[in-house]
C-alpha cells in the first residue's frame, strides 16, 4: 500500500516546476518545528516519529497513483516519469520520539534534494501535529494522575485511524493501557475493557447483568455501578461478586463526592481491596481535582484523543537552507511579521543544571558542515538522532519496540523538567529557547 497520496497537491506541482526550471536537484534542508506551544502549554511532547518512518517506507508512486496524476493533469509527463522511481534518498535527523520540545525546537530536519524533501511536508506534519498534540495532553494528564494508572478510552471520539494513532501517542506519554484492540495488536500496548451501560440494560435486572459478567470474566472484573442508583449498584456488586471484587467503575455524578461515598460503602461492606475507577469526560484538570479523592485509576476518552482542546501542535515545515546556483550554502527564511522563521541548519541541545533543564539551546549554522556537537555545549544533552541515513530508515524506532522505547524515553526526560513545568495553568514555556551561532 502506498502512502504517497497522503499529501497536498501543491507539493507535486512544486516538484514538477522544479524539474522544469532545473532546481529539483538543489540540495536543501527542511525543518519541522513549532513557533509556539498550543494553549499556553509549558512543554510539548514529540510523538508520531515511528509512525512517520513506517509511512516513509511506503511512500512510493505505484501504477494507480501515477494513473491518477496523468488522468487528472496534476503534473506533467516529466514529473510523472520522475515519480515512477521515487524513493526518499536523503537524511532525516530529529528529536527522539517521546522527547520534550519547546518553541523553535528543530523537531525534524530533512536533508536531500528539493525534489526529495518537498513532497514529505504534508505527511510529516499530519502525523507529528496530531500525535504530538495527543501526547502533550496525555503527558499533562499523567503528571496530574501521579502514580494512579490511566487508560485511554477515546476510540469512539476520533476517526478510526486517528484513534489508533492517538492510543499510541497516549501510551508513549504515560498512559498504561488502551481500549483499542488495533493499537494493542500493532504496537504491543496493553488493552483493557469490560462492559458498557448497554450490558446492564440488556438484562432484566442489574443483578442479572453483574452475575453474567462475573461468570464470564471472574471476580477480578470491574463492574459499572452507575446505570441506575449508584449506592444500590455497589451493594448489588458486592453481593454478587463478594468482597474480592476487583473494581467498580463510576461514569457520572459529582466524582469527588461520589468516589468518597463509594469508598466508604465498599469499606463498610468489607470490600476494602475493591478498586474504584472513574471515567466521565475527564481531562487533566478534572484528574487534578480528584487527587485527594479515594480513586485508584482513571479512564480518559474524548479529551485525550482531541489534545484536550488543542487537536494540533501547530508545527510547520519550512525550507531553512539550500545551495544556490553557484553551489554555495545559503540560509533562507520566511520573513513575515507574525510567521517568520529562522534560517540555517541547526543542532539542538538541552542545557541542564543538577539534572534539571534550564534552556533549549539551538546552534544555527549558515553552512552545511558547520554544525555544533554536544562537546561545544558542556552541561547539555544532545537532542537529535539520525532517523534516516541516505534513504536507509533506522527500524529501531518503529513497531512495538520503538513504541516501548519512546515511552521509556519520555518518562525519563520528563524528570528533567523544572517544577514550574508541572503546573496546568497557561504560562510561558517552562524553559527558554536560546539561539546561538554555531562555533
Image (cartoon, rainbow, N blue to C red):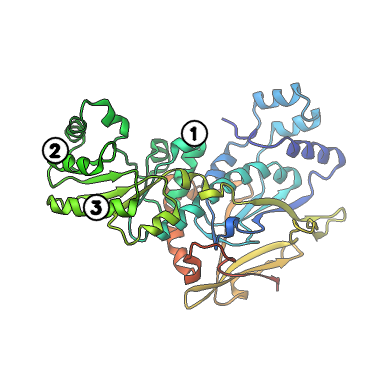
**Residue marked by disc 1:** 160
Q: Where is residue 256 in the image (x, y as percent from the top left)?
A: 33, 55
User: Which of 421/414 is in front?
Assistant: 421
Q: Residue at x 75, y 30 (%)?
A: 81
User: Which of the two discs, 2 and 1, labels the residue nearer the N terminus?
Assistant: 1
Tell me if 18 is positioned left or right of 37 in this view: right
Instruction: Calculate the distance from the C-alpha at mark 2 to the C-alpha at mark 1.
Output: 37 Å
Q: Residue at x 32, y 34 (%)?
A: 196
Number of numbered markers: 3
Label 3: state its secondary structure: helix
Disc number placed over residue 261 in the picture, else none: 3
Disc number placed over residue 240 in the picture, else none: 2
The image quarter containing residue 433 is bottom right
Label 1: state its secondary structure: helix
User: Which of the two discs, 1 and 3, labels the residue nearer the N terminus?
Assistant: 1
User: Which of 197/182 is in front?
Assistant: 197
Quarter placement of the N terminus: top right
Q: Nearer the viewer, mark 2 or mark 1?
A: 2
Amino acid at each position: 500500500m502506498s502512502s504517497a497520496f497522503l499529501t497536498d497537491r501543491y507539493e507535486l506541482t512544486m516538484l514538477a516546476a522544479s524539474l522544469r526550471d532545473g532546481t529539483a536537484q538543489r540540495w536543501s534542508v527542511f525543518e519541522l518545528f513549532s513557533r509556539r506551544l498550543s494553549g499556553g502549554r509549558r512543554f510539548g511532547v514529540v510523538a508520531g516519529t515511528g509512525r512517520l518512518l513506517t509511512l516513509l517506507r511506503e511512500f512510493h508512486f505505484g501504477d494507480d497513483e501515477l494513473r491518477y496524476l496523468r488522468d487528472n493533469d496534476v503534473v506533467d509527463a516529466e514529473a510523472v516519469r520522475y515519480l515512477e522511481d521515487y524513493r526518499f534518498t536523503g537524511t532525516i535527523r530529529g528529536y527522539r520520539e517521546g522527547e520534550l520540545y519547546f518553541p523553535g525546537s528543530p523537531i525534524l530536519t530533512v536533508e536531500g534534494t528539493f525534489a526529495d524533501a518537498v513532497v514529505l511536508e504534508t505527511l510529516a506534519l499530519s502525523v507529528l501535529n496530531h500525535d504530538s498534540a495527543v501526547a502533550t495532553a496525555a503527558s499533562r494528564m499523567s503528571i496530574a494522575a501521579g502514580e494512579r494508572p490511566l487508560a485511554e478510552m477515546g476510540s469512539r471520539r476520533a476517526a478510526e485511524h486517528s484513534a489508533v494513532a492517538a492510543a499510541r501517542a497516549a501510551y508513549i506519554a504515560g498512559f498504561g493501557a488502551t481500549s483499542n484492540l488495533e493499537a494493542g495488536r500493532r504496537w504491543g500496548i496493553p488493552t483493557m475493557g469490560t462492559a458498557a451501560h448497554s450490558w446492564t440494560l440488556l438484562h432484566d435486572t442489574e443483578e442479572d447483568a453483574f452475575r453474567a459478567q462475573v461468570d464470564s470474566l471472574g471476580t477480578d472484573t470491574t463492574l459499572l455501578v452507575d446505570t441506575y442508583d449508584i449506592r444500590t449498584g455497589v451493594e448489588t456488586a458486592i453481593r454478587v461478586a463478594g468482597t474480592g471484587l476487583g473494581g467498580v467503575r463510576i461514569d457520572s455524578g459529582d466524582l469527588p463526592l461520589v468516589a468518597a461515598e463509594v469508598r466508604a460503602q465498599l469499606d463498610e461492606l468489607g470490600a476494602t481491596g475493591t478498586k474504584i475507577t472513574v471515567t466521565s469526560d475527564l481531562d487533566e484538570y478534572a484528574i487534578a481535582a480528584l487527587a485527594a479523592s479515594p480513586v485508584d485509576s482513571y479512564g480518559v476518552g474524548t479529551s485525550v484523543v482531541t489534545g484536550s482542546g488543542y487537536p494540533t501542535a501547530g508545527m510547520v515545515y519550512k525550507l531553512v537552507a539550500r545551495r544556490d546556483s553557484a553551489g554555495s550554502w545559503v540560509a533562507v527564511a520566511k520573513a513575515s511579521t507574525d510567521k517568520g522563521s529562522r534560517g540555517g541548519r541547526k543542532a539542538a541541545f538541552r542545557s541542564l543544571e543538577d539534572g534539571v533543564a534550564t534552556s533549549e539551546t539551538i546552534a544555527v549554522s549558515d553552512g552545511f558542515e558547520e554544525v555544533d556537537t554536544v562537546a561545544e555545549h558542556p552541561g547539555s544533552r544532545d537532542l537529535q538522532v539520525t532517523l534516516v541515513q541516505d534513504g536507509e530508515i533506522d527500524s529501531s524506532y518503529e513497531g512495538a519496540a520503538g513504541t516501548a522505547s519512546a515511552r521509556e524515553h519520555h518518562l525519563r526526560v520528563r524528570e528533567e523538567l523544572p517544577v514550574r513545568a508541572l503546573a496546568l495553568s497557561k504560562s510561558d514555556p517552562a524553559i527558554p529557547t536560546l539561539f546561538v551561532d554555531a562555533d
